[in-house]
Amino acid sequence: MTPRFGHQVLPLLLMMLIAFVSVPATAAESAPQRIGDQPVLFVDSSLIAKSTGVSLKLHPPRKTGERLLTAEHPWESATLNWFTVLRDGERFRMWYECYDVDGWPTTDDTSFCYAESQDGIHWTKPELGLHNYKGSSANNILFRQVGEGKHRSRVHGHGVFIDPTAPLDSRYKCVSQGMFQGIGDRPYYIAGMTSPDGLRWTRQATPICPVFADSQYSAFWDESLKQYVLYGRVGGRGRAIGRSTSDRFDTFPPLKLVFENSDDNPPRSDWYNPACSQYPRQKSLYVMLPSQFRHQPDTLDIHLAVSRDGVKWTTPDRSTPFIPLGRPEDFDGGSLYAANGIVEFGDELWFYFSGAKLKHEETTIEKLAKPENRRVFSRAVAKKDRLVSLHSDESSGEKPGTLQTIPILFEGNQLHLNAATRAGGVVRVALLDKLGKVIPGRGLDDCIPFEGDQASHRVAWKTGFDLADWASKPVSLRLELVNADVYSVRFLKP
């Protein structure tokens, strides 16, 4: 009986196997990506199904060369350090750390300070009257140490954010390194602070995360996750970045590695700090601006990493700095660190950063005592939604680059391009149905070619521009580029 049973089953198994491997690729794909009416930024390949002659191109912001904030007071005499910039209503607000020569290097060498601005460019350091420094409270120091008893210490590597879910007495929150003696095998852990106004701070009595990490921290309330998210430095392939989430601000599990060196990084290099935040008005896009520390030549410059979920990170171009070093004689010629916070201003994004002539291993008190070596806060400016583009490769000449997106679900009835063409360049767009077939009247040959440079160009075909019949249905876009950059697409309602 056994042979007869085997002869019956084998053909059936073969038929099942053939049927399985013959399933069309579209049937095995995941559900369409719902994009609604939000801009789709081409900062990574996550929405790209296939492409030819098209690559991702980084468009670094323009460094302004401004010296927005410099060390000018006795409590800043050893240099400025980590800082956060937020736009809070009509004000720009800054929290920063600085060191003085007299205190260096002790546990009481750091002042946690405050500055503000009406335009984000011209900053003042108000006399707050909150801390007595060498006999006078006419300064902008919030405190030098915070906490109680054995848990009283300076802050280091802070990140301030505004919590939209919190009561007014704890609307402002801050994460940093803090000292908590007598609770484990080391005194330093991740600490949390809260404030009703961003000026008067209270430290949590216990660590909010039971790990030690040097460098800067980033934290924020993630509206899409309905959780707090915390980033800080961890070990990986050299210095790396870790992440933790919690539905409570006062307790986080240990940071887990999410971003580290890869084989295409320069040898003997690693990542120093996260400078992580959500992209303005984009709940499902995260931006990290870590400094890449190259052990030789001992420099740090700022790079761009992006993520759709905060866990899986990619770099559009690891070989090109997002904010590069200046010349060796410039104030930003040796090391750069990004501030926490991205500021949206009109059609621009402002990225604040600090720069110093000194390289990593050159930071000694003897050299910091010279004013020209102290860290300076500056700014870099980019057009909003134009950090990375789909770029038609110059090597392809007049042969178009093509790209097809994964299936998407959109809202609205108009498709808009954020794009720019070069000499002789054009962009055309086709709409495909759920089977990947061109929708009649919405093909590449039907599309009226786009030429020029516009942040929001309405795509039209010979038969019109209305796409209402395909709203909320699975479709894909096919783009054809000749000497062009496409930064984003967006479906809009009239």
Image (cartoon, rainbow, N blue to C red):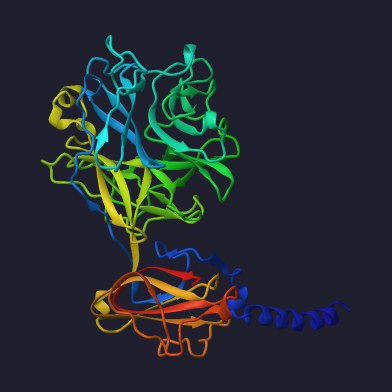
Q: Is residue 6 above or below residue 199?
A: below
For the N terminus, which image quadrant? bottom right
Please tell me which residue lies in front, 77 or 150: 77
Q: Residue furthest left?
A: 329
Please tell me which residue lies in front, 189 or 89: 89
- Which residue does the image show at 32% across and 70% down from the upper left? 454
The x and y percentages for residue 64 are: 20, 49
Horizontal relation, residue 365 to residue 15: left or right: left
- Which residue does the image show at 29% across and 79% down from the upper left? 451
* Residue 273 visible in the displayed image: no
Quarter of image, res 354: top left
* Residue 487 visible in the displayed image: yes
Q: Is residue 60 above or below residue 358?
A: below
The x and y percentages for residue 486 are: 35, 70
- Which residue does the image show at 33% across and 77% down from the upper left? 53
The x and y percentages for residue 273 are: 37, 40
